Each structure stands twice: as C-alpha cells, then as structure tokens.
Image (tube, rainbow, N blue to C red):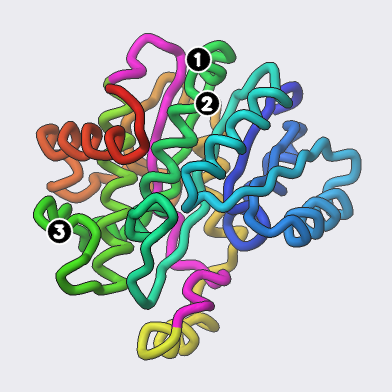
Amino acid sequence: MTGKVCLVTGATSGIGYETALGLAREGARVGLVGRDAAKVARAIGEIRARAPGAALDAFVADLSSQAEIRRLAAEILARYARLDVLVNNAGAIFDRREITADGIERSWALDHLGYVLLTLLLLDRLKASAPARIVNVASAAHTRGRIDFDDLEGAGRYSPIKAYAQAKLGNVLFTAALARRLGGSGVTVNALHPGVINTGFAKNTGGLLGFGWSLIRPFLSKPEDGAATSLHLATAPDLAGVSGRYFARSRPTPPSAESQDRAVQERVWEISLRQVGLSA
C-alpha cells in the first residue's frame, strides 16, 4: 500500500482504529475521521507509536450531519490529490429515536446516508485515482432488516434493532446499486460483515439493549479480528476488479434475499439521493 492514500471513518476506536492501523502498517497514508478531535489525536498518537513513521492525517466530523459531511469532503479533496481507498466504517445504534438537524432519523442518517453522501462527494477523486476501492462496513444484522417504505424512519414505532438492521441493509443495497454504476470506472465497491466484535458499539445505550450488550461483550471477538475483512477488501491483490459483493470472514457470502432485489436497490438509491440532496 506504499504510495496509496486511504480514508477510514469511525477510526478512533474499535474496528475503524484497527483498520487504520493495519493500513498504516502496510505503508499507506491514512486519514482518520472521528467526531471528537481529542479522540482523533489520541488515535493518531497511538498508531504512530505502534507503526513508527506512519503518515496520518486527522479529520473531524459528525457523520450524522450532512453539512458536516460536505465540509469534511471539501477538506479531504483539498488535502488529497488522490484517494485510493475509502472505508466507510462509522456507525452506531441508538436506544431512542432521535432526529438530526436535517430532519432524518439518526440511525438512518449516520449508518446509511453517511456512507452514501461521503462516498458520492468523493467519487470523482476515487475515479481519478483508479484503480480505487470503496469498502462499506455493513453487518449480518442486515439479514434481519426490512426497508419499510411506509415508515422508513420509525415514526410509528421505533425499535433500535430494527432501525439499525434497516440501515445496515441500506449499506448492502447501496453497494450493489453503486457497483452497477461504477462498471468500467476502475473503482470497486464491496460490503462486509466484520463479525460480532467487542468494541464501544452500543456503549451509550441504556435499558435492556445496553444491559444485554454489556453481558455478552466479554465473549466477543477482538477489534483486530473485526478489521481483518475490511483490510482484506482494501488491500488484497486478488480482489482487483471484484465489485458489488458481500463478504464475511474475508470470503464472498450471499447476502439477504431482499438486499439482492434490484427493484429495492434502485428504490433505496433514489430515496437516498433525494434525502442527501443529490441528483441521480
């Protein structure tokens, strides 16, 4: 990866941190995106200690805010003349329904639309840097998801798990729809399940969800194991030209039936672009 420029969102802890570390160790210049400046600085310091000489850049943005994403994208484009790998990793689960400044339910805004908007704002730079790769960290939770076109944002009855699963399904649908549009561009896009990993995920939730997660956390896999598939998709030479696939344990794996429905893919694509203010 020497000479490559990579960007990792949600890079201050857990899977994102380990992904950034792995890319830095492979010789890439890595941009770390987080929503807390102090945590980004701390992550960069820790990676430099573990990967001496690493070339690292700090970016701060709340990826549930479209204004923040647009500002971030402008900063990235100003900083990097090329972009070889984009790893969309930032995400969270919320135990109560919240509405962002853009008027969108927060799970859908962060876990799905954050991927959509940042990717599309950086897409021309990725194309100009081809061969380039987009890696979308989804989840096996997508198999429990359903796109509720009548109540996409859970206004009727909000469920944290339902909202998260729907957003992760959105990631897989977006990956497939984008892959079709990238044919022949030299840019690939793939989605993945990182495993069930012991990270800070769900640490801010309360009630039964937070309690249940605290009970199982000691039995979960390590963050470095969770980053393995992300790193594989970002770096493996044998994946050059592989696009529109879903991976688990670094192997292609069939995603859910709904995620493979082209009509659903296209409908979610159109809705998502409308929500982030972009044209098809």
Comes first in the chain, label 3 or label 1: 1
Up-down: is 54 above or below 154? above
Comes first in the chain, label 2 or label 3: 2
Instruction: Indicate the quadrant containing the C terminus: top left, top right, bottom left or bottom right.
Output: top left
Q: Is residue 211 visible?
A: yes
The residue at which mark 1 appears reads as 127
Q: Is residue 99 left or right of residue 121?
A: left
Element on which disc 3 rests: loop
Of the two numbered discs 1 and 2 in the rendering, the one whose residue sits closer to the viewer:
2
Residue found at x 50% / y 15%? 127
Q: Position of residue 55 (x, y in %)?
A: 82, 36
The residue at which mark 3 appears reads as 151
In the image, what residue type sits under mark 2? Answer: Leu
Q: Residues within 10 Å of mark 3 (few under 14, many from 20)?
A: few
In the image, what residue type sits under mark 1? Answer: Lys
Span of residues in magenta:
181-205
In the image, what residue type sits under mark 3? Answer: Asp
Q: Position of residue 20 (x, y in %)?
A: 67, 46
Query: How far, Cα to Cα, is label 3 from label 1?
Result: 35 Å
Q: Quadrant of residue 142?
A: bottom left
Q: Is residue 179 left or right of residue 117?
A: left
Name the foreground residue: 206 vs 130: 206
Up-down: is 263 above or below 103? above
Name the foreground residue: 73 vs 50: 73
The residue at which mark 2 appears reads as 122
Residue found at x 33% / y 71%? 97
Q: From the image, give the main secondary structure of the stretch colored magenta.
A: loop
Name the foreground residue: 27 vs 180: 180
Magenta stretch contains residue 201: yes
